[in-house]
Each structure stands twice: as structure tokens, then as C-alpha cells.
Amino acid sequence: MLFNSLAYAKFFATVFIASWLLASRPRARFALLVCASYVFYCGIDLFAPLSGEPLTAPYLKFAPIVFIGSTVDFWLGRWMAGHDDPKARKRALLITIVMNVGLLVVFKYWNWLTGDLGALLRSAGLPVPDVTLKLELPLGISFFTFMSLSYVIDVYRRKIEPSKNYLHYLTYIAFFPHLVAGPIVRGKDLLPLFEKAPRLTSRTAGEALFLIGTGIGKKVIIGDFLALNLVDRVHAEPTSFSSLEVLCAMYAYAVQVYCDFSGYSDVAIGSALLLGYRFKINFDQPFKATNIVEFWRRWHISLSSWLRDYVYFPLGGSQKGNFRKYLNVWITMVVCGIWHGAAWTYVIFGIIQGFAVAGTHWFRDATGRSARNDAEELPPWHPGRWIGTFLTFTFAAVTFALFRAESSQKAILLYRQLLAGTTFHPNLPRSVVLILFGAIAVQWLPRRWTDRVRDGFIAAPAVAQAVVLFMVALALREAAVTEAVPFVYFQF
């Protein structure tokens, strides 16, 4: 069920009303949220029969994976709390690692491991069997497995107390705002909120509506527009476009992914806030970053921080000397690339990002710079800040193109065309250029300006808010294509 669809609007309105009617009955409320989350995940439009359409559940086959995994990890957490034997606790931890990583390997990586990678190993003389599995990739598997893993690991480390409420844990994993495409919410952040009585004030409601409106606006008005009018065309046939047009398409794809995914995160945060629960932000103006390390601190924060805490630190972090630090950074970024998908393009992306991030750390260590962001060290007017920002954004855009490439061969064609040096640009309409650079420029507006716009909306009377949202809905209707376009991160 897409956030940018009428089906979701009707679904959420129903859940919103029903959940607040049950606010004084916590058990019934969480039972409702669990059922609603599985209805959402299975793609069931309960209102379809009203318009004469059959009631379908296209993703029902994936629901048992979420339910069984949640149940196993809930009881593993409870079991760990009652045992102090280190070996027994490690065996329990191993169960959740094998289960969750195993799900990813079987559903997401198996065919690639036995196919492309297997062929490479077989060509080297290694006896790797070619066993292809005809399995569909469950929606959101990269997100809910990471959430469940982080919870059990935190319980094992004794950083959090295990949940004692089964319904709470089922809701934590399956909660529909974050289930399909994140953000990756930690148990230590959300489960304590479930223990408290939910509250909804006029201010939080206004903030939530603002996030939902701007989130869908970013996705439909900017992201979908750039995709349909430039990005998709260039990636379909890169040799038909000039180097300048390919470069602009790379810039446009970086902006598309940002608007698409940060827009999804905004709607997720706003939806959860309307139900009484607050998620942390997932993006923090990443195109203002002056180096690639800062970029990853601002981009998909829930994933970056997860990889830091559960991959980089367990590898030793920076505690075993600079060389190990750089190696650990590189390994973490390779894992980041592979997390996004099972293809050589994702592996290459992770390798390149790993070298870039590790190289930036090396440079900062060699020059004696502090661990603070360069954006904090340089004044706004300093030319080094602008040069660093431009180079960082260009590097991100050029490497993000690997995500969009349909294959390694298509990626090679794209980069060859980029290096051809041609500058004709009949395929760059003014509207595309204005939307592209306008979307980038907005990130450079002083934060106090955007805060004032948000606070002004929140403080406005309900009637004024309704008028603004109605105008946004009209703009979305004019900008949208015939059918709702899926979010980019659904494929990851």
C-alpha cells in the first residue's frame, strides 16, 4: 500500500480514528495496530469491495516471515533476560543472527551468490553449485530484519531491558509507518513509548500534517517529475544523450532518491506522530555536506548509525590503530552497498564509498583536523566550503547512478557516455533544470526559515491548515501521473 495513494489515505483515516477511540484500552489498541499493520503489509484494500473490486492480499505470503521472526526474537530476548551463562546467551544471540541474516541470504542474495558470483568462482575452478531459487523478495526485509537484530543484540549487550509485552513487540516490528521502507527504528527508542499513554496535541498534529504534506510533495512534485522527464530516459538509452545530459541525469537521480526516500521518511514520521509515537529524523540536509563522511552522517541516518553500532564498532572501530580503523570503515561501507541489493553494481558502490570514506578519515588524521564536520569549522562564505560541497554532491550523484543502473553493462555505457565530453543538450527542458537546481537550493536556505514555515503552519487555525493541505492536494493531483509511482527504497 503506497503512502502516495488514495488507498493509504482511507486506510490511515480509519486506523487513526479507531486507535484513538481505543486510547484508554492499551491492549485493544495494540491489537488493532498489529492487525492494521499486517493489512497494510499484505496490500489489502479493505475499501475495494465498495467500488466493486475484489478483495485481494497480494503480499499475504510474506506475512508469516515477519510474524515468525518477530515471535522468535521476542522470546529470545525474554530468555536472555533470565540467564547469565555467557555461552548460553551467545548461543541465543547466534540463533537470531542466523535467522535474520539467513532470511536475507535466502531471499535477497541466494540467486546472486549461486548465479553471478557462483559463475565467477566456478571460472576460478571452485566447485560452486548453481542452485537457483524461485523466490520473491519480501517487502521491507532489509528493514525489519535489521530492526529485530538490533533489538536482540541490545538485549544481549544489556543496553536495554527485553520487552515483556508480546503485542508491543509485534507492533514494534510490524508498525506500518516504518515496515516497508524504514526508517530503521531501534527498540530502545520505540518500545519505551509503547509503555506510556499516547498523547496528541494540536501542535504535534500540525507538525505531523506538515511532514506528511511536504513528504508527499517532495516525492510526487520533485522526485517523480525528475524521474519521468530525465532520469528514466537517460538510463533507458544512455548512448542517445550527451555527456552534459548524462551528468544532469546523475544529479537528478541523486535529488530524486533524496526527495523520494526523505519524503517517505517524512510521511512515516508524520503518520507515527499522529498515532502518538515519535520517530527520529532520517535525513539532515545531506547536500550541504562538505565531505563524504559528513554526507553519510546526514543521509539515511537510521542506516548509517545502525551500521556504525552493529558493524563498525564490533569490528573494533578506531580502537586498534589507524590502519584497522580505515579497514573497518571500508568493510562497513561495503556492507552498506550490499545491504541495498544483490548485484555487482551495489558491491562496486560499497567498495567506492568505502575507499572515499576511509580516505577522508585518513586525510583528516594526516592533517590533524578535529572530528567535527567541516561545515562547522568553515564559515558559510569560505570558498573551501562551497568547493567541498560541490565535489561531495557530484561524487555522491555519480556513484548513486550505480543504484539506478539496470545492470553492470548499462552502468558502463552510462559512464562511457559521461566521459565522452559532448555538451549538446536538447533533452534538458527548462522545467527540469529549474526543478533540479531549485530542489538543491532549498537545502541551503537557513534552517530558521524552514522552521518558521513549519511553525507558522502549526500555529495556524485548523481552517487555514485545511486550506493549505487542500491546495497541496490540488498541486499533487496536477503533478501526479495516472498511477501512484512506487517509492525507490521499496526495491532495497
Image (spheres, grey):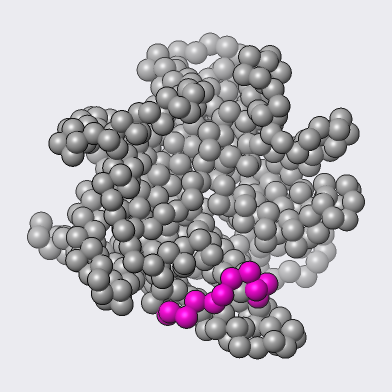
Asked if residue 204 can be seen in this view, the reply is yes
Out of 456 and 408, give the one closest to the viewer. 456
How many numbered marks are there? 0
Residue at image coords 63%, 14%: 381
| Most frequent secondary structure within the magenta stretch | loop
Q: Position of residue 8 (x, y in %)?
A: 26, 53
Q: Is residue 352 left or right of residue 207?
A: right
Q: Residue furthest top?
A: 424
Q: Position of residue 296 (x, y in %)?
A: 63, 41
- Residue 49 part of the magenta segment: no
The quarter of the displayed image where residue 99 is located: bottom right
- Image height check: is 429 above or below 415? above
- Image height check: is 86 above or below 348? below
Image quarter where the N terminus lies is: bottom left
Q: Is residue 331 left or right of residue 45?
A: right
Q: Is residue 301 left or right of residue 47?
A: right
The quarter of the displayed image where residue 482 is located: top left
- Residue 164 part of the magenta segment: yes
Out of 7 and 456, give the one closest to the viewer. 456
Q: For the magenta stretch, what is the residue range?
A: 156-166
Residue at image coords 30%, 44%: 203
Q: Position of residue 475 (x, y in %)?
A: 24, 30
Residue at image coords 71%, 27%: 377
Residue at image coords 52%, 53%: 492
Out of 273 and 490, give the one closest to the viewer. 273
Q: Position of residue 75 (x, y in %)?
A: 52, 84
Out of 183 and 1, give the one closest to the viewer. 183
Asked if residue 408 can be seen in this view, the reply is no
